[in-house]
Image (cartoon, rainbow, N blue to C red):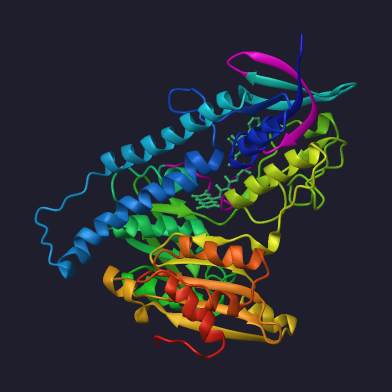
Amino acid sequence: MSKSFDVIVIGGGPGGYIAAIRAAQLGFNTACIDDWKNDKGGPAPGGTCTNVGCIPSKALLQSSEHYDHAKLHFADHGIGVTGLSLDPAKMLGRKDAVVKQNNDGILYLFKKNKVSFFHGLGSFVKATDGGYEIKVSGTAEESLVGKHVIVATGSSPRALPGAAFDEENILSNDGALRIPAVPKRLGVIGSGVIGLEMGSVWRRLGADVTVLEALPTFLGAVDEQIAKEAHKAFTKQGLKIELGVNISEVKSGKKDVTVTYANAKGEAQTLEVDKLIVSIGRVARTSGLASEAVGLKLDERGAVAVDGECKTNLPNVWAIGDVVRGPMLAHKAEEEGVAVAERIAGQHGHVNFNTIPWVIYTSPEIAWVGQTEQQLKAAGRAYKAGTFPFLANGRARALGDTTGMVKFLADATSDEILGVHIVGPMASELISEAVVAMEFKASAEDIARICHAHPSLSEATKEAALAVDKRTLNF
Ligand SMILES: Cc1cc2nc3c(=O)[nH]c(=O)nc-3n(C[C@H](O)[C@H](O)[C@H](O)COP(=O)(O)OP(=O)(O)OC[C@H]3O[C@@H](n4cnc5c(N)ncnc54)[C@H](O)[C@@H]3O)c2cc1C
């Protein structure tokens, strides 16, 4: 006998669990199916983000930053440290505890919102009169029927051809978060968000890190001026970044990995490392869904094909998050989840793709929203730019972290903010003001006229807005 639901969500990552909670809040009888297992085989909802992505990476970034500060910066504050030591097992244990708190938090939220949770793989069986039959294969088999189905099955790491992940020597993001002892030599293929964050963690802890990137430009999606500043800072910290490389072979030995490649000049090179992280992007995960059983259409990249409202080719089947087009970001997945639940309820759920913030949690952090200067130039849009360096910000000086700047781009005529780009301390937090401003179609002058607390890093945001009109007060 099948259990019937108004809404069944397949996948309990940030897209799926948030969609399920919002659907339940709207009065729908809702189920969420997720197959992630913790090390004891129990449920671990939260998806990539909670288990092997956003949360554990930030836990390790925080721990490694504390270590880096104690080793390199405490002395500047007159604090002497003797006998500084590192306990990687404890650090990884703390990270695992943070992950578990989040897993447990989601299970609690399901209970609180009366979402029925099923631990196992969810697959389409067939379309029925009342919607769609979904089989759950877990510790126990279940048959569910849902009037609406939201596919939120996320993504998996892309492997380099000929170099499968073994999670011992050749690591995906999963293995990169579980290296038991700091490797002497660490290679990272791919200088995107994940590669830079993971490279930063292990560099701070003492690894000699080399990043190999196929593209000729560093962080091509980032505003050029900001990317240059970040590159300068990372190089100064000792991160070796080689651009424009062409990898020909990755060979995994017993205890090391050899990467053979041509550098940007076409010269043959080899890199020998103890561990290699491969972070060259992610692919939509549809295996296990049995999309063919109901004729759910995938696009040419294997993602679930959706329109602007996350509708698939099947009536009442929706898809959100990493398994569909668009940026692979947890907050994008969450916003789509909320919007779809609201559309099912007949409301006008909405996601503004122009105001999705991006963050790279390195040190300095990089964050941006809206368009870059190179995008505005390519579009032929007349704009004004204003920048303000953290070097001239009192709070940044007090923190001892004056790297970077805030940059505003505004329309040349209307002064509407078109993009805000930050490289520097707490950029991840500072960017929210810019997101709110852009969502409300504010002008640079609007920000310049708002009273910002002193001393705060946010004063750099106000000053960059003033810089658009060439009237900074502190620089
Ligand atoms: C190292 C790393 C760091 C990251 N850091 C950030 C960050 O700081 N900020 C940010 O915004 N994004 C970050 N991301 C990206 C972010 O993790 C993803 O964008 C986000 O998790 C996507 O959410 P989702 O719900 O679409 O999919 P996922 O989080 O992948 O969740 C999908 C869930 O569905 C389950 N599933 C799949 N198929 C089935 C099935 N058939 N039946 C049942 N369950 C199924 C999966 O096991 C998984 O639990 C990071 C990613 C990585 C790898």
Left or right relative to 147: residue 321: left
* Span highlighted in magenta in the image: 138-167
User: Which is more toward the observer, 439 or 409?
Assistant: 439
Q: Quadrant of ligand 1?
A: top right
The quarter of the picture where the C terminus appears is: bottom left
Residue at image point 57% right, 73% down:
420
Tally of numbered tags: 0
User: In this rendering, is residue 76 above or below 181?
Assistant: below
User: In this rendering, is residue 344 above or below 169?
Assistant: above
Query: Does residue 158 appear in this view?
Result: no
Instruction: Please state the horizontal and vertical placement of residue 129, each as a whole percent of the image.
Output: 90, 21
Residue at image point 73% right, 47% down:
303
Residue at image point 69% right, 47% down:
336
Left or right relative to 80: residue 263: right
Residue at image point 50% right, 64% down:
191
User: Which is more toward the observer, 419 or 286?
Assistant: 419
- Residue 136 in magenta? no
Query: Does residue 444 appear in this view?
Result: yes
Instruction: Please state the horizontal and vertical placement of residue 392, each as a whole percent of the image.
Output: 36, 82
The quarter of the picture where the N terminus appears is: top right
Instruction: Please state the horizontal and vertical placement of residue 379, each as a whole percent of the image.
Output: 74, 80
Left or right relative to 464: residue 178: left
User: What is the residue that sits farthest to the right in this orientation?
Assistant: 129
User: Which is more toward the observer, 171 or 455?
Assistant: 455
User: What is the residue that sits farthest to the top in this orientation?
Assistant: 1
Instruction: Please state the horizontal and vertical placement of residue 362, each as a whole percent of the image.
Output: 41, 62
- Residue 147 in magenta? yes
Splitting the image into 4 quarters, where does residue 143 fall? top right
User: In this rendering, is residue 47 above or below 73?
Assistant: above
